[in-house]
Each structure stands twice: as C-alpha cells, then as structure tokens.
C-alpha cells in the first residue's frame, strides 16, 4: 500500500508538531526505507525526486542516499545503483562508512567482489576508516568462493582496525571452510576466535553439522554435539534438525530417539520435514505405536502431516492387522479440515483397488 503510506507521511508532515522538524526527516527516512524493503524502489526514488524538485534548496542527508542505494542493490538493479552513486559524487554528498558498506555488500551480493575490494582502497584515499560493515561482506564472499589466501590477507587488514573481526566474520570463515570440506581450516578458525575472546554460537557449530549431515558422518556429528554440551553451549533447533536428518537417513533409530528426547527437553520442536523422516523411520523399523504417537504429536503442534505419511502409516497398519490403529489414524487425519476429502478419496481408492483385484482374480479363474 505504497500510495497510502505516502499520503500518511504527507498528512503527518502538514502537522505543526512535525513540519520542518527532525521528526519529519526521520519519518521521511522511514518511508523510503520501508518502500525499498518492500521492493518499491522506483516509487521511493520518484517520490524523493519530486521532493527535491519542490524544494531545490533542500540538501538530503547521506542517510537518505544510503537507503536508496541499498534499495537498488537489494532489487539487483546494478545500473540504477551505479547511476545514483555517480550522482552522489557529482553532488559532493559527504560519504560515510555506511555508504561504502552498502556499496561493498551490494557488489559482493552480485558476485563482483573485485569491485568491492577496489572500493576499500578508495575509502582509504578518502580518509574513511573501514570497519566490519565493509570487511565482513568481502570476507564472506571470498570464503564462499574458496579464495582463502585472499581471505587471510583481508583478515590481516581487518585486525588493524580498532574493532577487529566480529562473530559474523569468523562464522563466514567457518562456513567457507566447511563448504570446501576443509574441517581442519574450520577448526583453526574456531581456535583463533576463542583465543581472541570471540565465542562461537550455535550458528558457528551448525556449519560443521551441515557438513557432517551432507557427508553422512554420524560419529563426527555426535562427537561434536557431545563436546558442545560438555562445553556449556546450547544447541539450537537447526542443530537438532541436522542431526536427526542424518540419523534418520542412516536408520540409526536408537540415536534418533535419544536426540529427539533431548531436543524436546530443551524446548525445541521438530519441523515438518524432520517429523516426517522420523515417523517414516519408526514405521520402517516396525515401531508402529511410536510412529502413530509421532503423527499425533505433529497434529497437536499444529503441523499438518504430508498425505504420503498418512498413506504409508495407514497401509502398514492394515497390513499388520492393526485395524484399530488405522481407524484412529483416519480419525486424526479427518480432524484436519482440508484433509477430509483426502481421507474420502483414499478410502474410495482402497475400495476400488480391492474391487479391481477381486475382478482380476475372478477373470483369471474364468480363464
């Protein structure tokens, strides 16, 4: 509702309390920022241009330019972003580290890290000190591309800054090394950050768990999980999801049950994908009562199971002669409004299949 937002701003600006005050500028920045984040960068730019035309003496702040610049980069409109950048230089807008950080992040997002590095050199010539806003996107892009020698060179410059690397910096490095399958490099980063009193977060460890999950390395994943707990770190929901995914894929049911219990004890619930894998594994291992309980728990938590899961459990229950459990399962699925038709269709298909099987048997006997 971009037009309504603009009208609201104009009404607020007409009030004596706000007109020609700092509050009006703040509201204008909020308006442009909101429009840009909602993808209406063209609307924001046009409205900004109209405001400049109405009041040629008005000098927009660098914050306003930064908002529009970020908007064009978020929309992946590089030509528009570069045009605005040239306009800012032409108008001799006093650039800030945030301006350069916006440019650097934008270029890195569009895989033009060389241009981002050039901007760091330009900043130095302008006498603007770099910080994490500038360095982090470059380090993330270089690590993502596996260009670790260049990353280490950039880190040396970063260490000279007053603030130095942040947790985001180290997480980018760990992510890059894990993606490249270099766990030794990732572990060295872990030791480096701890030695500098920057302590890992669950996000840091989850990059290791992603690698273990991808490579199906159960023992390594469980060892790291144990070390995390012993060191006083609390795994998050993603940690448990990655562990459970690996354990279910490798059919390690006992460990999967153990992790699921610990996960719930820490107040984390499974998502649809993890619950589905866990339920299917319980069913495959003929732990039917537990599979039904997991299915029931999904509904209790407001998660609608996939129809495939219902179909699989229902078939298995009927094959095992567990008709009462199958009936309860159908009742559960029918309790979900949009599942009633599925259950009716499924019942009809079963009846049709039985009719067809009976007819085929009758025809074979006739032959």
Image (cartoon, grey):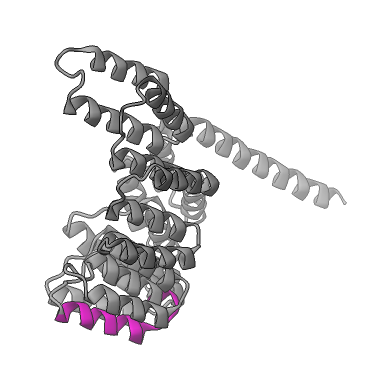
Point 22% across, 82% down: residue = 192
Q: Nearer the viewer, residue 13 or 34?
A: 13
Q: Which residues are magenta?
A: 178-195
Magenta span has 304? no
Residue 284: % across, % down: 46, 64
Q: Does residue 344 appear anywhere in the picture?
A: yes
Vertical arrangement, residue 72 with respect to residue 31, above or below: below
Q: Nearer the viewer, residue 16 or 343?
A: 16
Vertical arrangement, residue 96 with respect to residue 229, above or below: above
Residue 350: % across, % down: 60, 42
Q: Which residue appears farthest toward the bottom when viewing the image?
A: 184
Residue 60: % across, % down: 31, 34
Residue 311: % across, % down: 51, 48
Q: Label the magenta part by its dominant secondary structure.
A: helix
Point 36% across, 52% down: residue = 102
Point 47% across, 64% down: residue = 115
């Amino acid at each position: 509702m971009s037009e309504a937002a603009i009208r609201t701003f104009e009404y607020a600006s007409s009030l004596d309390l706000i007109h020609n005050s700092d509050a009006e500028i703040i509201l204008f920045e909020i308006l442009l920022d909101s429009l840009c984040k909602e993808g209406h960068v063209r609307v924001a730019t046009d409205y900004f241009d109209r405001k400049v035309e109405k009041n040629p003496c008005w000098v927009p702040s660098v914050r306003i330019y930064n908002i529009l610049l970020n908007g064009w980069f978020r929309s992946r409109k590089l030509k528009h972003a570069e045009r605005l950048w040239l306009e800012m230089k032409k108008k001799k807008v006093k650039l800030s580290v945030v301006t350069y950080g916006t440019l650097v992040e934008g270029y890195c997002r569009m895989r033009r890290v060389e241009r981002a590095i050039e901007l760091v050199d330009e900043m130095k010539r302008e006498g603007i000190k770099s910080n994490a806003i500038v360095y982090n996107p470059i380090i993330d892009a270089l690590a993502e591309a596996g260009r670790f020698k260049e990353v280490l060179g950039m880190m040396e410059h970063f260490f000279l800054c007053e603030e130095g690397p942040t947790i985001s910096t180290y997480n980018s490095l760990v992510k890059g090394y894990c993606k490249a399958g270099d766990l030794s490099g990732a572990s060295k980063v872990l030791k480096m950050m701890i030695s500098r009193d920057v302590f890992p977060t669950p996000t840091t460890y989850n990059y290791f768990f992603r690698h273990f999950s991808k490579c199906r390395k159960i023992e390594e994943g469980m060892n790291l999980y144990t070390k995390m707990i012993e060191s006083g770190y609390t795994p998050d929901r993603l940690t448990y999801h990655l562990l459970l995914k690996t354990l279910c894929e490798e059919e390690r049911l006992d460990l999967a049950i153990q992790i699921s219990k610990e996960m719930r004890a820490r107040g984390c619930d499974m998502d649809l994908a993890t619950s589905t894998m866990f339920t299917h594994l319980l069913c495959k291992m003929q732990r039917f009562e537990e599979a039904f309980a997991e299915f029931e728990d999904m509904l209790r938590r407001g998660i609608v199971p996939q129809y495939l899961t219902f179909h699989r459990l229902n078939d298995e229950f009927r094959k095992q002669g567990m008709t009462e459990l199958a009936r309860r399962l159908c009742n559960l699925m029918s309790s979900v409004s949009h599942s009633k038709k599925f259950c009716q269709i499924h019942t009809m298909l079963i009846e049709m299949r039985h009719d067809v099987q009976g007819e085929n048997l009758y025809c074979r006997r006739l032959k």
